[in-house]
Image (cartoon, rainbow, N blue to C red):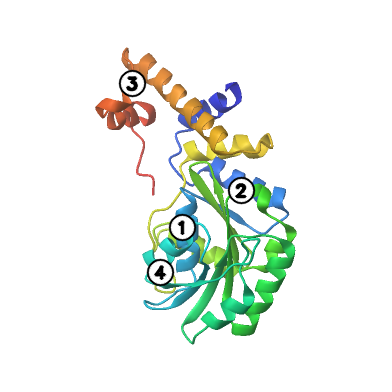
Amino acid sequence: MNCIRTKLENVLRDRWGTIGPLSVSTGEAIAKKLKANPALLLHSAGAALESTLRSLELSFGDEVICAAVSYPADSMTCAAVGCVPVFCDVDKDRKISVSSAESCVTDKTKAIISDSADEKSVETLRAFADKHNIKLVLNLKSIYEYTPACVDCYACVIAFPSSGVAVANEFEAYEGIFAYHNCGRPIINEATLVFDKILGGDMRISEWQAAIIADIVENDKEYCCGIEQKFMADSEAFSSDYFEKQTGRKLNYEKSDFPGACAVLWGDIPAFC
């Protein structure tokens, strides 16, 4: 608790909203830990997957192959960006059956999403993707599922507690994901909304979220649902303590205190953009 509390106190003191020093340095730490290419933190794993798919500049009606047994987010995110999820079979190990995926390929197929980072599986799917000139995207539920083979895909999405990371293995992917998550602003051209017709949305991670991820990465904590709940509880406890010190009353999450709490916690901060 003390470690995460210190980080949260630093976030309040430094008064950064989003895309601040902590989210940037934590992304760099994740990339170093994975021995991978640039890693970008987003406010959720769903946002990371959506930004990744949008970076492919998919058109309405384009098709993306998904495993019939996989995370619901795979197909739901395809639908969210206007694509058609096409389901293929899986084998006994719940890995995509390439023979089944072959039967799903049409002239509208643009990508394939896999939830497995097994080296043999990634190698096989990369060959399949190259054969059909489509992109391979991995969607993993933990940083501990990442393997060296993941660098062979277009991008890899990793779920973290209440956030997500996109590891972009091609600069084109990183550039597109960054622009989509940052209200359309590309990496270099500070405040414009011009990037290959990208409009984008606000999928940026807050420094508050980044503090939690930084604690996981720095201390090499393997997390699961239970640990995620503990991190959220620690964060909530700190918020409540701080709120009570500033206002003299307890923070009641059940009575819509959240807007007021934000004002107390963040104070008069300039626009986050």
Judged from this view, the residue extending furthest toward the top is 248
Give the amino acid type for the residue marked by disc 2 in the picture: Ser
**Mark found first going from the N terminus, 2 or 4:** 2
Q: Circle 3: is it few (<14), some (14-19), or many (20+) Cα within 10 Å?
A: many
Give the amino acid type for the residue marked by disc 4 in the picture: Ile
Q: Secondary structure at mark 4?
A: loop
Q: On residue 72, which mark appears?
A: 1
Residue 34's x, y, as percent?
Answer: 70, 52
Residue receiving disc 4: 198
Identify the residue at horizontal 33%, vertical 32% (top origin).
Answer: 268
How far apart are labels 3 and 1 at the CA level? 35 Å
Q: Circle 2: is it few (<14), some (14-19), or many (20+) Cα within 10 Å?
A: some
Q: Circle 1: is it few (<14), some (14-19), or many (20+) Cα within 10 Å?
A: few
Q: Is residue 200 left or right of residue 235?
A: left
Identify the residue at horizontal 46%, vertical 38% (top origin).
Answer: 16
- Tally the numbered discs: 4
Q: Circle 4: is it few (<14), some (14-19), or many (20+) Cα within 10 Å?
A: some
How far apart are labels 3 and 4 at the CA level? 40 Å
Give the amino acid type for the residue marked by disc 3 in the picture: Leu
Residue 98's x, y, as percent?
Answer: 63, 75
Q: Marks 2 and 4: which is nearer the front?
A: 2
Identify the residue at horizontal 56%, vertical 25% (top origin).
Answer: 6
Residue receiving disc 2: 142
Residue receiving disc 3: 251
